[in-house]
Image (cartoon, rainbow, N blue to C red):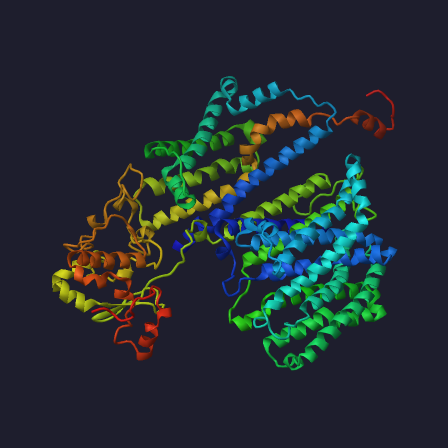
Amino acid sequence: MNRVHVVKSILWGLVGLSLAVAISRFAFGLGATTNLTDTTPWGLWIGFDVMAGVALAAGGFVITALFYMMRRKEFHPMVRPAVLTAFLGYVAVVCSLMVDLGLPWNIWHMIVFWNPHSPLFEVGWCVMLYTSVLLLEFSPVPLESTSRYAKIREFLMKFRFPLVLLGIMLSTLHQSSLGSLFLIMPFKLYPLWYTDILPILFFISAVGLGLMMVSFESLVSSWIYGRKPESHLIAKLGKAAVWVLSIFLVVRFVDLAIAGKLGLIFSGTWESLLFIAEIMIMAVIPIILFAIPKTRHSLAGQWIGSFLVVFGAIFNRINVGGLTMLSTTGDSYFPSWMELSISFGIVSFMVLVFLFAIEKFHIWDDRPREAESDPHARPQFSRGGEVWLGAPAVAGRTKYSFAFVIALAIGFMLMPGTKLHSSGVENVPTRAARGGDTLFVDGNRDGYGVAFKHQFHVDTLGHEQSCVRCHHMNLPQDKNSGCFTCHSQMYAAVDAFKHDWHNSPNGANITCSECHMDGENRTAASAKHCDACHTDLIPAGATITIEQYMAPAYTDAMHDLCIGCHREIVAQQPEKQAIALCAACHATAGPEYLRADVRERLKRPEYNHVVLPGVSLEQPE
Amino acid sequence: MDALLEFATGPLFRLTFAIMILGLARILILDLYGMWEAYRKAGDKTIPWGLTISRTLEWIFPVKRVINHRPIYSIVAILFHIGLLITPTFLFAHVELWRSGLGFGWWTISPMLAEILTIATIALGLLLFLGRVGSRNARALSRKQDYLWPLVLIVPFITGFVCANLTVSPNLYQLSMLVHVFSAELIFVLVPFTKIAHCVLMPLSQLVSTIAWKFPAHVDEDVATTLNKKGAPV
C-alpha cells in the first residue's frame, strides 16, 4: 500500500470509531460517554476541539492578510490550502460543539434571543459569520471545475476582497473573544494564566500559530503525496513567527511581572511545570530554531519548529480551557476514550475532506495523481493477498470502506453494554442496615439515613407475631433476611431471582429442565414457581405478597413499606397525624449509638435530602 | 466459563454482528456504486429490465430449475436455506434476547417446528457436504471454503439443539452454549468476506452482468488506436 492509502485508511478507521461513539453520545447522553461532571463541565471537546480548533484555523486570516493586504505575492501557493484549512477547522469546531452541547438543537436560540453582554454570544456569532465567510471565500475553488456555475463564481469573485477583509476582521474579533470568555473566571483559572489581557494574548498567539499551522499543514500534505515541500516559503513564515512569538513572550512576561506573579513560575507546583513546558514548547524553542538561518531552512528544523508551535498552542488552549482550573475546583478529570475518539474522529474527517479537495480541485498548482491511475501503468499486486484490488479509485474505496466498517464495529463492541439499554439510573448497590434495637437504614451509606426503631416497632405491633408485618421473603434456609438481600439496588428494580446464577456450575448448578417443562418455550411464566423447590422462602402469614421476580428499588421498597403502614394508622387514629409526615422518619438525628459529631452533622437540614421548609428537625413523639 | 460466556454474548456479539451488518452494507454499496460507474461510462445505455428482473426472480424462486436440473440437489439446497434462515431468526429464545436488548421482538415459531427445522438443517447440511465430496464434477469445482461452509453452518445448530432440548449438566450446557455462540459469531464475521455474501449480492447479480457487459463509449476506436490501426473498422 502506498502512503496515501495507509494514511487515508487510518483516518477512515478513526472516523468509523468516532461514529459509533457519536451514536452512543446522542442515544445515551453525555453522562454515558464523557468523564465530564457538574464541576468540570468543559473538557477535551472545548479545550481541544473548540479552543484549539479555532486557534489552528488562524492560518486562514494570517495568510490572506499577508497575500491580499501586505501584497506578499510569493505566498500565493499557500492561500488556497490556508483558507480551506481555516474553513474545515471552523466546521470541525461547529461539529464538536454540536456533540458537546447538552441540547444542541437549541443552538438557533443565539440568533433570535440576543444577549449582547455575554462573551459566548459574541463567540457564537463570530463562529457562524466567519464559517459562512470562509465558505464564500473558498467556494470559487470547487466551482471552477465546472462551467455550469460560472456565473455564481464570477459573482463571488467580485466580492473576494471585501470577503477577505470581513474574514480578517471576524477572526480578530473571534480569536480574542475566546480569551475574553475566561475573564469571568478570575478565581477559577490559575493566576499564571489569568490576566486582564487574555484576549490580546489569545490574538497574538493565534497569529504566530496561524503562520506555523500553515507551514505544518504544507509539510504534512507534501509528505503524504510525496511532493517537494515549499521550504522557501516556510522559512519566510518561520522568520515572521520569530517576531510574533517574541512579541507574545514579551507581553506575557511583562504582564506577569506587573501583576507580580513571576514568582509563581518557580513555585514548583504542577501548574508552574505546565507553564514552563507550555512557554518552552510554544515559544522559546521554536524561536531559537527559526532564529538560526541554518535550522530555519532545513526540513528537520521546519518540521520540529512548526510542530512544537502547533502542539504548544493546543497545550496553551487546553490549559486555559480547563486543565489549570482543576486545582481550584479539586475535581479530577481525564477525558474518556470516547471523548478522545470523537476529537480524533472529527479531526480525521476534516483531514480526509482536505485530501479529497487537494485531489479533486485546483488547490495546488499540480494536482496529485497516483502513478497507477495511468491506463498504461502495470497493476501492482498487494503485498499480503496477491490480489489486484483494481484501479486506484476502486482499490482505495475497497480499503477505506473496510477500515471504516471494522472500526465502526469495534466502536459498537467497546460501548458499555449496560448502557445500550440503560434507563439512565445510576448503579448504586445497597448494604445491610446496621445497629441493634435501632437500625440505621442507610442503603447506599451516604450518611442520609433513617434511624428505624426496630425494637419499638416489635414491641408496639405485637412482639413475635409482628415480624411478618414487614418481613415477607427470606433466602432459602434463612430467617428474617435483610431488606438489602433482594432490594440490592438503591434506585433501580433488580432481578431478585438471579436466573443465570441458578443455571451456572458456579452457582446452584441445576439443569434447565429442573424448572422448565419440555416442549414449552422457556419463559419465567411457564417455569416452576420458586416455592415449588424452596418451601421456606415466604414466612407464614406474611402480609406482603410476592407477584414477580423483580424487587423494587431499595428507596421505593422502604417508602412503600413504612408509608403504607403509617397511613393506615393515621386513617384509624387521626390524632397521630405526625407519623405520616416525611419528617417523622427523616428529620431525626442519627441513632444514639452514633458518635456525637456524626449525630450533630445529620441534624443539619442541608444534610438531609427531604427536610422541607417549616418541618421540625426534632422527631415527633 | 461464566465470564467467557458473558464476553461472548456481550461485546463479542456486538462486534461480530456489527461486522456482518456493516460489512454486507459495505459490499452492497460498493457494488451499486461500481454498477453506477459502469452505467455512466457505457456507450449503450439500454437495460433489458424485464429480462433482468425475470431472470433474477427465477434464481430467487428457482421453481423451473428444480424440475429441469438436478432436482434432488436443488430441493436439498432450498430446504437448507429455509432452515438456515427461519430457525435462528424466529426462534423464541433468540427473539427474547432481542427483546431484552432492543426493547422489541417479533413473531416466533413453535418449539416443535424449531426442533424439526433444526434437525432437518443439520441433516441437509451433512447431505450437501457429502454430495460435494461424492461427486467428481463438484470436487473439481470446489474450493476449501465450499467444503467447510456446510460443516461450519451446522455447528451452531447442533450445539443449539443440545442446549434447547437435551437434559445436560450445567457444565455441558455452558460448554455447548459457548460453542454455539462462538461458532455463530465466526459465521457473522465470515459472511461479508466469503461466498455467503451472496445473501445481499445475489439479487443484483443478473443486473451486474447486464450492465458490466457493455463497452464504454468509443471503446472500439481506443482499441484500434492501441493496436496501431487507427481508423480501421472494428
Quadrant of the image occupied by residue A307: bottom right
Q: Quadrant of residue A556?
A: bottom left
- The answer to whether residue B231 is above or below residue A14 is above
The answer to whether B221 is drawn above or below residue A582 in the figure is: above
Residue for point 55% across, 65% down: A334
Q: Quick check: A326 left or right of B230?
A: left
| Position of residue A235 in the picture relative to residue A570 (left or right) | right
Where is residue A458? Give x, y as percent: 16, 65
Which residue is depicted at the point 68% across and 58% down? A54
Where in the figure is residue B142, as x and y percent of width and height?
57, 33
From the top left corner, tell me how far across and down residue B153 is, in percent.
47, 38
Looking at the picture, how far across and down is residue B89, in whole percent?
43, 36
**Residue visible at 32% across and 66% down in the picture:** A614
Q: Quadrant of the C terminus of chain A?
A: bottom left
Pick the front one: A120 or B169: A120
In the image, A105 versus A89, the foreground residue is A105
The front one of A106 and B100 is A106
Total numbered circles: 0
Looking at the image, can residue A233 be seen? yes
Question: Could you tell whether B82 is left or right of A587 in the image?
Answer: right
Instruction: Tell me if residue A49 can be seen.
Output: no
Classify residue A34 as left or right of residue A573: right
